[in-house]
Image (spheres, grey):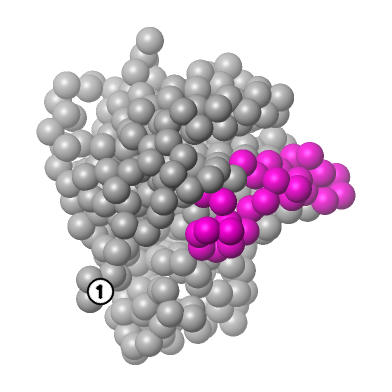
């Protein structure tokens, strides 16, 4: 039976920006309600408590100068951590460290054979750079998990990102790393932050051909997503991954206030079904799913629930 852990808890909810910011804890509350409602019906589904990363783990990707900056900003709780998208608040260092630590906890559960699949809703903070915050992302939990997976000896790590925004922090952070295969389906960067993620970018050196961007036009819906994901599926089967990290941002669904795509939750179901099969074929089932973006509360809950239910499906 495929076992699934969803990481939820009060400390994880503290990654929430103030004053009506779109990335607030309200994004998780409806999803958590629905997960706790269905929990009794799924004996293979469990809640796991969050964990906090230590500074050594954060430093595997980020610079010490940047950590010092976030710590000081966290103490003061004023201003912004970037040029205006990511506000500081008191305790932001600890909150962001918990997002990373929870993703790492999930990874270790997978690598230790304790669980088949893990979902961290406050993960997938894919814009954070080595030395700066960006796009609501303080620390890059996905990048840090990739580094830890490499340290554990994995040589074929597949990162799949379906957030409407290009996962630039991961894509370029491992652009020359031949062990990290990336496929990123997103709204065309000509129309949406961060303005990156073009077809011609395929990696460099030994990593050439191991990175794939699939930009979609404004207004693309389930049909266009299905075509794009077929391409992603072919890529994934070629990789034969030992681990899949799945950034399943929900901001591509119709009605999101800051993007222009028109998916329904069926796109998340389709993507998860495909990756679920590939994981059991090649990677002993290991899927680390990360919530990513999404700013329409109902959309977020619906999309993430599809991901969890499909991972819990034993057919």
Residue 273 visible in this rendered orientation of the protein: yes
Asked if residue 133 is positioned above or below residue 57 in the image, the reply reads: below
* Magenta stretch prevailing secondary structure: loop
Asked if residue 101 is positioned above or below residue 75 in the image, the reply reads: above
Q: Residue at x 22, y 71 (%)?
A: 20
Front residue (pair 253, 247) = 253
Q: Quadrant of the C terminus?
A: top left
| Residue 133 horizontal side relative to residue 118, left or right | right
Count of marks, rendered view = 1
Residue 204 rendering spot, x and y as whole percentages: 82, 51
Q: What range of the chain is rendered magenta?
A: 186-214
Which of the 4 image quarters holds residue 212? top right
Residue 103 visible in this rendered orientation of the protein: no
Q: Residue at x 34, y 88 (%)?
A: 78
Does the magenta-highlighted stretch encompass residue 190? yes
Q: Residue at x 44, y 44 (%)?
A: 219
Pick out the residue farthest to the top.
315
| Residue wearing tag 1 | 18
Pick out the residue farthest to the right.
205
Residue 183 rendering spot, x and y as whole percentages: 62, 40
Residue 66 rendering spot, x and y as whole percentages: 56, 78
């Amino acid at each position: 039976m495929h076992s699934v852990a969803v990481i939820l808890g009060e400390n994880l909810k503290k990654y929430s920006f103030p004053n009506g910011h779109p990335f607030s804890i309200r994004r998780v509350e409806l999803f958590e309600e629905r997960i706790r409602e269905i929990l009794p019906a799924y004996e293979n589904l469990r809640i796991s408590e969050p964990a906090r990363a230590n500074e050594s783990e954060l430093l595997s990707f980020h610079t010490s100068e940047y950590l010092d900056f976030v710590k000081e900003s966290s103490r003061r709780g004023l201003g912004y951590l970037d040029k205006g998208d990511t506000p500081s608040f008191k305790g932001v260092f600890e909150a962001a460290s918990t997002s990373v630590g929870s993703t790492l906890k999930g990874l270790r559960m997978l690598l230790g054979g304790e669980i088949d699949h893990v979902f961290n809703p406050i993960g997938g903070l894919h814009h954070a750079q080595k030395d700066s915050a960006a796009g609501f992302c303080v620390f890059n939990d996905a990048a840090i998990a990739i580094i830890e997976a490499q340290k554990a000896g994995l040589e074929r790590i597949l990162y799949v990102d379906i957030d409407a925004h290009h996962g630039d922090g991961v894509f370029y952070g491992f652009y020359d790393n031949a062990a990290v295969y990336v496929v990123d389906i997103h709204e065309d960067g000509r129309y949406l932050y961060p303005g990156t993620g073009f077809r011609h970018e395929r990696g460099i050196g030994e990593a050439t051909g191991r990175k794939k961007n699939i930009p979609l036009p404004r207004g693309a819906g389930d049909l266009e997503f299905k075509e794009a994901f077929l391409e992603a599926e072919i890529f994934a089967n070629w990789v034969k991954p030992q681990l899949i990290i799945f950034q399943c941002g929900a901001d591509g669904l119709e009605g999101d206030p800051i993007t222009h795509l028109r998916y329904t939750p069926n796109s998340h179901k389709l993507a998860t079904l495909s990756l679920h099969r590939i994981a059991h074929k090649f990677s002993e089932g290991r899927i680390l799913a990360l919530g990513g973006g999404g700013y329409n509360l109902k959309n977020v809950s619906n999309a993430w629930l599809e991901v969890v239910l499909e991972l819990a499906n034993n057919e």
